[in-house]
Amino acid sequence: MTDWKKDLAQLAATVRQEQRAKKPVKNIHDLDENFRGRKGFSDSGIPLTKKTIKAKLKNRASYSRKNYAFSRLRFINDSRAESARQKRLEHPEYNKKISAALDHVDKQEAAAQKKRDIELKWTDNKSRPSQQSSFYIGGRSYMDDDQEEEQPVDYIYPIKKKEPEYTPQFSKDGNGNMKFKNKVDEEIFRLKHKE
């Protein structure tokens, strides 16, 4: 009887050699180079093969801000971003837009709060005993002068151009009979002038 451990070792050695002899299946884009000379990438920097996609994801994951926290370029970029923000905040149009947006949001929030309060009063009113009959809900009264009137919105509908109707082409012979170019025109004329 042969030693099974030796047979297993020989089998493992042959499998190893076969695996080493195998060449990986190459992608058609493996040998393509972009204008910078990088293989597997397009000219715009998009990875084209699985290998390059994996490498790009690995690079992106390994790049973190803490690694570059004290670099000169980081300081330059941060200072430029801060100066741009300051210019944007100083611009009068920007301030007008921000204040208008905040006013609009405040009005919406106030209206929503008022609606929530009324709904809460309604639920309280429903849960009261029935002997307490009168209760003011506090909805919108007719005497409120501070309520702004809703302005009507004019919608402008686009004007649709009508396509001209199809007119069949025909000619009349000497007897007054109509002669059509084809059967389709004749059928269209017959359907339009059907009595």
Image (cartoon, helix red, strand yellow):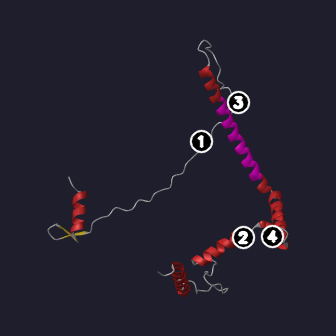
> What's the CA distance linking mark 4 and mark 1?
56 Å
Instruction: Read off the residue under disc 1.
Output: 152
Closer to the chain start, of discs 1 and 2, is: 2
Element under disc 1 = loop
Closer to the chain start, of discs 2 and 3, is: 2
Q: Does the residue at mark 4 contact the one at mark 1 (Cβ under 8 Å)?
A: no
Residue 62 bears which disc, if any? 2
Residue 134 lies, in percent from the top left, at 63, 15
Is residue 51 placed above or below 170 in the rendered structure?
below
Instruction: Read off the residue under disc 3.
Output: 145
Q: Is residue 68 left or right of residue 140?
A: right
Closer to the chain start, of discs 4 and 2, is: 2
Residue density around tag 2, few if under 14, some if 14–19, many if 20 or more, within 10 Å: few
Q: Which residues are magenta?
A: 96-117
Mark nearer the viewer, 4 or 1: 4
Q: In the rendered structure, which amino acid carries the disc numbered 4?
A: Tyr
Residue 96 lies, in percent from the top left, at 77, 52
